[in-house]
Image (cartoon, grey):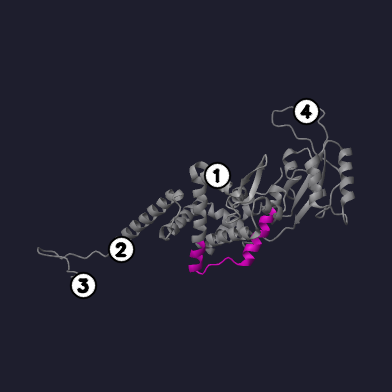
């Protein structure tokens, strides 16, 4: 079975990032036309604000407010996200996006309405959140406890990101190879050229939508030694000769189908990864993601966010978000009650002497301790 990228919550992450992309962009931009009648960016935002009775818009506004609070809190505590940290995580994210979608980073950004600066800003917020909520000792301990799990990830192994075109016969596969070789430069085929043929010809309907992208494969995990021999012998941009696709083994209790058709594939390696030392620095983004989604730290994270909201002066100006404003007010009041209770619990008890006529000290007097 192909060991695909776990995507470290990538699908949810990408939807979150794409969902809040475009803030501050041109509102009257025409984004679609229906029989020459325009649908504008403003109309889209209005529809999103009304979606699910406004819940989508409230969640998005709250996430923007929390992101601002995180940056302010980090600045007060002199906690920063270095450019090197951000770039390292950006580079890793580009690999996950390629393996998941078949698109290069620039294309994916354009299709989701984002810029690289948008992504850098969100990654910075993620780094700051982890540093504010999790100590370095906790991260180191979690890393040591999860080394075995980390060793299953593609970027920590000899692995490839590859595309393939699956065809009905060896003759069809040979024709595809000849067509791609005719477009090659220095024996290398561009991902765009390969993807175009895959979108037209490959038999796999899912991979067809991704330009033939098969995903990330760790050496020794496919169960197909012939495929791996070819893949790990190719350099990025090189394509294979036709490779037979092994017949699917029958499921338990299923009879072997007679005369199964023999399919062939042509593969191209898009990116190769060498085995690397397993370090916290190389896996910091994964560790942060796992920890912040761990129940032990989730509770701490939610409490941290709640405290940030409760102690901040947040003014919601639009009546559309009155519900959110009320939630912030209730959070502040609850925090004030809790702090007041904690303060009362810290007031030392004044011993009362035995005997009648004892009375508490007058205001400003020292407590009696005899």
Q: Is residue 8 above or below residue 255?
A: below
Q: In the image, is residue 71 part of the stretch drawn in magenta?
A: yes
Whichever of callouts 3 and 1 sits on the residue coming sooner in the sequence is 1
Q: Which residue is mark 3?
A: 366
**Residue found at the very far front of the displayed protein:** 36
Mark 2 vs mark 1: in front? 1
Distance from label 3 to label 2 (Cα)? 18 Å
Q: Nearer the viewer, residue 144 or 296?
A: 296
Q: Which residue is mark 2?
A: 346
Task: List x then y, in percent, for residue 364.
Answer: 20, 72
**Residue found at the very far left of the displayed protein:** 356
Task: List x then y, in percent, for residue 64.
Answer: 52, 56
Give the quadrant of the N terminus: top right
Q: Is residue 145 visible?
A: no
Distance from label 2 to label 4 (Cα)? 77 Å
Mark 4 vs mark 3: in front? 3
User: Which label belongs to residue 257?
Assistant: 4
Q: Nearer the viewer, residue 292 or 146?
A: 292
Whichever of callouts 2 and 4 sits on the residue coming sooner in the sequence is 4
Whichever of callouts 4 and 3 sits on the residue coming sooner in the sequence is 4
């Amino acid at each position: 079975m192909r060991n695909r990228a776990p995507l470290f919550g990538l699908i949810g992450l990408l939807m979150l990032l794409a969902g809040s992309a475009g803030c501050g962009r041109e509102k009257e931009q025409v984004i679609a036309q229906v029989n020459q009648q325009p649908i504008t960016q403003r109309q889209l935002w209005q529809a999103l604000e009304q979606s699910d009775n406004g819940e989508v818009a409230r969640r998005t506004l709250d996430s923007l407010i929390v992101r601002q609070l995180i940056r302010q809190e980090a600045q007060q505590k002199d906690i920063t996200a270095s450019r090197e940290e951000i770039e390292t995580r950006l580079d890793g994210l580009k690999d996950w996006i390629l393996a998941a979608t078949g698109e290069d980073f620039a294309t994916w950004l354009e299709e989701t309405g984002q810029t690289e600066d948008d992504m850098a800003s969100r990654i910075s917020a993620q780094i700051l959140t982890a540093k504010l909520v999790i100590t370095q000792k906790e991260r180191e301990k979690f890393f040591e406890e999860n080394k075995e799990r980390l060793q299953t990830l593609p970027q920590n192994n000899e692995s490839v990101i590859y595309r393939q075109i699956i065809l009905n016969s060896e003759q069809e596969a040979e024709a595809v190879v000849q067509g791609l070789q005719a477009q090659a430069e220095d024996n290398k085929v561009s991902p765009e050229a390969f993807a175009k043929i895959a979108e037209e010809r490959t038999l796999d309907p899912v991979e067809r939508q991704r330009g033939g992208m098969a995903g990330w494969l760790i050496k020794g995990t496919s169960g197909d030694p012939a495929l791996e021999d070819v893949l790990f012998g190719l350099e990025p941009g090189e394509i294979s000769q036709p490779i037979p696709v092994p017949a699917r083994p029958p499921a338990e209790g299923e009879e072997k189908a007679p005369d199964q058709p023999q399919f062939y594939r042509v593969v191209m390696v898009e990116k190769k990864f060498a085995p690397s030392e397993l370090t916290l620095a190389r896996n910091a983004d994964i560790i942060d993601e796992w920890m912040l989604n761990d129940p032990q730290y989730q509770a701490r994270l939610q409490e941290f966010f709640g405290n940030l909201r409760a102690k901040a002066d947040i003014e919601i100006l639009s009546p559309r978000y009155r519900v959110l404003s009320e939630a912030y007010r209730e959070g502040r009041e609850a925090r004030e009650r809790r702090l007041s209770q904690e303060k009362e619990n810290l007031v030392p008890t004044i011993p009362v002497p035995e005997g009648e006529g004892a009375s508490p000290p007058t205001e400003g007097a020292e407590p009696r301790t005899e």
